[in-house]
Image (tube, grey):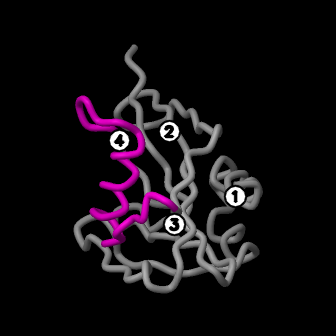
Amino acid sequence: MKIRKGVVLVVKNKKGEYLLLRQRKSKSYSFISGGLEFGERYTDAAVREAREEAGLKINLKKLTETDQKIKFSGSRKGPAEQKVFVYRPDGADVNIKVDNNEISGYEWCSKEEAFKKLKNKPPLISLIQKADNY
């Protein structure tokens, strides 16, 4: 079976807060994420997903590609593997405008708040724990 490739973008502001998006269908919280389009590079996918889901304009100098990957098999479209990026915007870069078709809202959360909102998603919690290393 083919493995879908994608990206996860952990956005952490200067206050140490994490951007969590609330998914419209599932009502659960997650980071910016999505699949690669045909011929697309991982970095380009991270930039595109940030723009599409949160209206973020990414400054590539503040985007870090990590060595982390999330693998899962429970996806509705089959097994997937997502490459993880960390983005640390400064104030001027942060103007969130969510895609109302997919996203019902967003929150900037402390590490502790993010842990609570992601409690049923251990792979995403581990990304928060590792985000400070990048």
Select label 3 or label 1 by which is in front.
1
Q: Which residues are magenta?
A: 35-61
* Image-quadrant location for residue 118: bottom right
Which of the pair 100/93 is nearer the observer?
Answer: 93
Amino acid bearing label 4 = Gly
40 vs 128, nearest the viewer: 40
The residue labelled by disc 3 is 29
Question: Going from the N terminus, do you reach mark 3 or mark 2 first?
Answer: 3
Type of amino acid at the residue the image marks with label 3: Tyr
- The residue under label 4 is 35
Q: Earlier in the sequence, mark 3 or mark 1?
A: 3
- Tell me the mark number nearer the camera, choosing from 4 and 1: 1
Which mark is nearer the camera, 4 or 3? 4
In percent of the image, x 75 and y 61: which residue is there?
Answer: 132
Which residue is labeled 2 in the image?
82
| Among numbered discs 4 and 3, the one appearing first in the sequence | 3
Q: Position of residue 99 (x, y in %)?
A: 27, 70
Assess whether mark 2 and mark 3 are in contact (beta carbons under 8 angstroms). no
Spatial separation of the CA atoms under disc 3 and disc 1: 17 Å
Q: Which mark is residue 131?
A: 1
Q: Secondary structure at mark 1?
A: helix
Q: Do labels 4 and 1 touch, CB within 8 Å?
A: no
Which residue shows up at 70% across the image and 71% down it?
A: 116
Q: Residue furthest top?
A: 1
